[in-house]
Image (spheres, grey):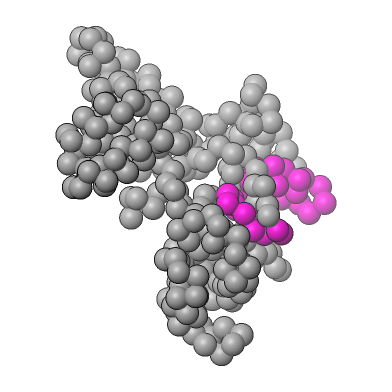
Amino acid sequence: MSNKDLLDNIKKLRELTGVGFKDCKSALDESKGDIEKAIEFLRKKGIAKASKKMSRTASEGLALVKSENGETSIIEINSETDFVAKNKDFINFCKELSEINFKVKGDLDKINNFKMNNNVLVKDNLVNLIAKIGEKITIRRADYFDNTKGTNFSYVHSAMEKGIGKIISIVKIEGIEAGKNDEIGNKVAMHVAASNPLAINSEDISEKLVDKELEIIKAEIVNSGKPKDMAEKISKGKIAKFLNDNSLLNQVWIMDPKKKVLNVLKENSLDKPLKILNFIRYKVGEGVWDE
């Protein structure tokens, strides 16, 4: 790794963890330049704490949501800089892609091979836009929620235009009665955008992710000087908190810290109990390094 690459990685690692230059360099040396492994190394040493910030990247772009006839679609298009994300040509391209995404129900292959308004395929228009703007642009991910079994609600955080922003959430809820208790759907979507849950229930959180978190927690406790038997007891409490903090139903309700999401759903149920069937949250650029 060149000195410039090393310095760039140290800068990224410092931004993500808040840890000093020397420790970041040591972590990168230990992990052979792998930033994700360096973060894990720092956490095990107790130097860096787990935070939402660690899963963010410098990737830019836009996320767009479209809802019609009870159906909802969402798509993310990435650019290298925020400057390009504000470019008129880029925004217009993203808007048309959002319309296409809704038509093909979140199928990326179909999106790439769909003819745009200029009668040119999306994938070819993408190449032309890259050549014109001079930055790498990627159609990263797309999803679609149908209008069966529940009602879809979406929320755009700090929308730059209707349906366009950097953080967008969608939630499908069963038991909603239009005009009676549908306001709670919008609030749950807002909660998802703010709290970034990993799953609806704690048992739905990836076992691999839980095992990795438990490994990090135990290593951090042992490295702090506590004996192994004590580390076992403390880690059980910490992993239970991790599961509660990251499962939607067990999260503290953003609008009232005395309640959990499951309590709010019960309070707002009418003839049928409110049940969250599915949700998704896009934050532009989040997790790109893991791909």
In the rendered image, residue 267, in percent from the top left (x then y), is placed at 71, 33
The residue sitting at 24% across, 9% down in the picture is 226
Residue 107, compared with residue 78, is above or below; it is: below
Residue 220, compared with residue 96, is above or below; it is: above
From the image, which quarter does the C terminus lie in? bottom left
In the rendered image, residue 212, in percent from the top left (x then y), is placed at 28, 35
Compare residues 95 and 245 and report the one nearer the observer. Answer: 95
Q: Magenta stretch: residue 54 in it?
A: no
What stretch of residues is rendered in magenta?
Answer: 161-189
The residue sitting at 19% across, 13% down in the picture is 228
> In the figure, residue 269 lies in which quadrant?
top right
Label count reads 0
Residue 279, compared with residue 31, is above or below; it is: below
Compare residues 204 and 284 and report the one nearer the observer. Answer: 284
Compare residues 291 and 145 and report the one nearer the observer. Answer: 291
Query: Does residue 117 appear in this view?
Result: yes
In the rendered image, residue 224, in percent from the top left (x then y), is placed at 26, 13
